[in-house]
Image (cartoon, rainbow, N blue to C red):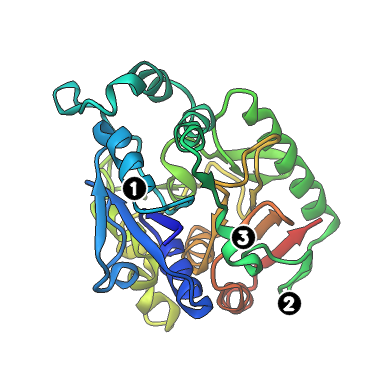
Amino acid sequence: MTLALIAGEGALPELLVRRLDEQGVAFRYCEMEGHPSSDRARKDRPITRFRVETLGSFIAELKSHGVTEVCLAGRVARPKLDPSAIDTETMPLVPRMMAALQAGDDAALRLVLGFFEEEGIAVKAAQDIAPDLLASPGVLSTRQPTERDEKDAARGVEIIAAMAAIDVGQACIVKGGQALAIEAMGGTDKMMRSLMVAPKGLGQKMLENEAGWDDPIGLAADWLSGTGSATSEIGFVRDPDLPKGGLLVKAAKPGQDMRVDVPTIGPATVLQAAMVGLDGIVIEAGEVMVLDQARCIELADAHDMIFWVMA
């Protein structure tokens, strides 16, 4: 096996596993301890697990098994470093690892990728395994953008470019030329959730079913069938102090390394955008991966939303 897949959370690892199996490509399945991938992705495969404190010995183990390429796929939260768990192979990497943990996401990822490359292991992008993850340009939904939407989309791209200067995020929500929300550490889901507030009479209680946002398909079952309201079930409504609607704009930051942490959306993203009352989703062509594109378009049409891959 010359390829190692380091799988994290989310739907991307499962999709890549399926593609690699279809292509007949043998690969080594790996996970960071504490950040497991889904059961659907793992199935009954042998798993090589590692800790950030043993990254050096993990890389050495991959080399000993003939691994020459590694693909990082799925979300992995920034780990905490336990000095007592650092092994001998990893000790020389510690100064740079500490610097990486203090840096922004891009800088941290570049340092981690460098550890593999210094040992002769090339980093393979997910879209190299599944090129169709990058959608072709065009308005893919029935609903077409207005001139105002086109201006908001362009404004969103400008905002993301400005965010890149301080390595913050890859998405924002724009309405009437104004940023309603920008993506930060919590990611796109948390950004969309920030548009919601407790309705009058509920005080300042925290979101009781916050975990439900991680599975909006399950949370929205009654709502999608027309028998209930997902937002009322979670006890929150759209903030009345914000304008209605808005576009979710998602794009790679200028100069972003497209081998890892590529912006990604999927059906769950479209569902949550509908749940918080957005007008649509705009992504930049060639810079954002789309999981299950057909389902994303179907959901956008079902909720009269724009789904636009902007060239």
Sort mark 3 into few (<14), some (14-19) or many (20+) by Cα contacts within 10 Å.
few
Name the amino acid, label 1: Ser
For residue 142, which numbered disc appears in the image?
Answer: 2
Given residues 19 and 59, the one toward you in this image is 59
Q: Position of residue 243 (x, y in %)?
A: 61, 47
Q: Nearer the viewer, mark 3 or mark 1?
A: 1
* Residue shown at 38% from the left, 24% from the top: 101
Q: CA distance from mark 3 to mark 2?
A: 30 Å
- Amino acid at circle 2: Thr
150 or 52: nearer the eye?
A: 52
Q: Are marks 3 and 2 in contact (CB under 8 Å)?
A: no
Percent from the top left, x then y, of residue 102? 40, 20
When the figure is inspected, residue 184 is found, relative to residue 139, above or below; the finding is above
Query: Nearer the N terminus, badge 1 or badge 2?
Result: 1
Q: Which residue is mark 3?
A: 128
Residue for point 23% across, 46% down? 33
Vertical placement of 133 versus 73: above or below? below
Kind of element beneath mark 3: helix
| 62 to the left or right of 189 | left
Residue 217 location in percent, x, y? 39, 71
Work out how far the residue at label 1 is from the one at label 2, CA to CA, in angstroms.
52 Å
- Element on which disc 2 rests: loop
The local secondary structure at tag 1 comes to: helix
Q: Which residue is mark 1?
A: 64
Q: Amino acid at mark 3?
A: Asp
Q: Residues within 10 Å of mark 1 (few under 14, many from 20)?
A: few
Is 116 located above or below residue 268 in the figure?
A: above
Circle 1 or circle 2, nearest the eye: 1
